[in-house]
Image (cartoon, rainbow, N blue to C red):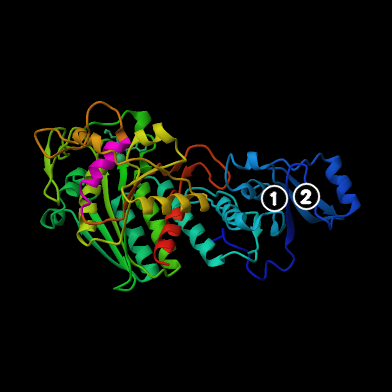
Amino acid sequence: MADRFANTAQSTQPIPVHAVGKGGDYPADITATQRDWLKATGFSGALGEVSLLPDGGAIAAVLVGWGTTATRARGRFHLAIAAQKLPVGVYRIASGIPDEDLENEVLGWLMSNYRFSKYRDAGAVKAILSAPDGIDVKRVEAMVEGDALARDLINTPASDMGPDALEAAFRALGEQHGAEVSVIKGAALLTENLPLIHAVGRASDQAPRLLDMRWGDLGAPTVTLVGKGVCFDTGGLNIKPGASMGLMKKDMGGSANVMALAHMVMALKLPVRLRVLVPAVENSVSAGAFRPQDILNSRKGLTVEVNNTDAEGRLVLADALAVADEETPDLLLCLATLTGAARVALGPDLPPFYTDNDELAADIGTAADRSADPLWRMPFWDPYEPNLEPGIADLDNAPAGGMAGSINAALFLRRFVENSSAFAHFDIYGWTPVAKPARSKGGACQSARALLAVIEKRVG
Ligand code: BES
Ligand code: ZN
Ligand code: ZN
């Protein structure tokens, strides 16, 4: 992996990097000539500015603009802006970054080195960072690797990331960490009582399946992650218009992000008993596809009237959540690119989450803030429960009216979780539509870093 810290051999003479705020003081050890250079070239300390200080034919040091508190509040990963402007070399952080921001800024630098080079040469990483003192290097590396895994999985199109390939990636992750993986696939979903996963995925050439990973010591606190693994969402018979279908390779973003989080947890050997469940399906169109008005049974025994085959995510997750809930895990987290409505409400970068557990909500809020991995609580709003009841079956997968789409979907999922008292669902986007510092356009790791911090806090 090119996106880690410099190794010791590389970092013999790293170039010092100083962050200097708008109108701030220059570092004490720069020369009079270098000061003149900064003046002559108009370095002001504005966020994103970079000045290379010469020393004969070499770069003596780098100054990066650190802006003001107000300009920094508009984004995250400010060092990443500078990192991508630097020439080939090995660098070290010398001054100007507050201790409390160091880990996130370093993380942003490494995340900005992500390249998706599966289908073309995406260019080499130029600016390598040597690991600074005062941060947990292993933890940062685990987060960067998880971030890259999520982005790779999402960026890979459905032609190479169908249910077969997602299963292979899931098995590879399990193997890397010595986890046990089992898979229930095709007709076995019916005999194992997972009818919703089967119904949604049965129209595809690649059989629907439930991927199941277990890792860690028996007896440790139990954490179960459930991720939506819809490898492509055509909408099914309620087919999506072209513009809406355009991005639907990313509809396995929930599974990519639970795999990213699982990687972090396992790489750091957190003292938990981890389970990861991914219903992996393709929502396709064929003569065998499930239809509007079909009434399906679920694992839990609740019947569901399908009023839109495009509301497939909640169906596959319902069965997976029911499986998860049967063991009453200490913490149950569900990640899914579940609704367009969540984007309308909060935009692509601020996923809503839902939980009835105020203590868990507070932990998530704090962790999201500290991890520069923003999340926003929305309500499991009980008064909307009647929306979910169609009259002819227990549940309606797509309440009419077109309002409260993200809440309705969350309430639907909650019906399948009865025992777990610490349950949260994240309606993520899983995609960066316009490149931002540390985040190229494409697949996005969202909520996994915040949830790593939540798990760490809850297991001490
Ligand atoms: N995968 C989509 C949700 C989605 C769409 C996420 C766009 C991110 C961006 C999901 O399966 C879906 O189509 N949901 C429908 C539900 C509706 C039919 C009740 C939606 O949100 O429009
Ligand atoms: Zn859909
Ligand atoms: Zn979907």
Kindly give the residue lying farthest to the right in the view shown. Answer: 32
Classed neighbour count for the residue bearing mark 1: other residues with Cα under 10 Å, few (<14), some (14–19), many (≥20): some
Residue 358: percent from left, percent from top: 36, 50
**Depth order, front residue of 171/95:** 95
The answer to whether 414 appears left or right of 130 in the picture is: left
The answer to whether 146 appears left or right of 134 in the picture is: left
Q: Is residue 259 above or below residue 438?
A: below
Quadrant of res 174: bottom left
**Depth order, front residue of 379/109:** 379
Residue 84 can be seen in this image? yes
For mark 1, give the secondary structure. loop
**Quarter of the figure with the C terminus:** bottom left
**Magenta-drawn stretch contains 79:** no
Classed neighbour count for the residue bearing mark 2: other residues with Cα under 10 Å, few (<14), some (14–19), many (≥20): some
Provide the residue span drawn in magenta: 406-418
Mark 2 residue type: Leu
| Res 52 label | 2
Q: Is residue 65 above or below residue 173?
A: above
Tag 1 residue: 86
Kindly give the residue lying farthest to the top in the view shown. Answer: 401
Quadrant of res 7: bottom right
Residue 367: percent from left, percent from top: 47, 54
How far apart marks 2 and 1 lie (CA) works out to: 8 Å
Dot 2 or dot 1: first in sequence order is 2
Give the dominant element type of the magenta stretch: helix, strand or loop: helix
Q: Residue at x 33, y 71 (%)?
A: 220
Contact between labelled residues 1 and 2, with CB atoms less than 8 Å apart:
yes
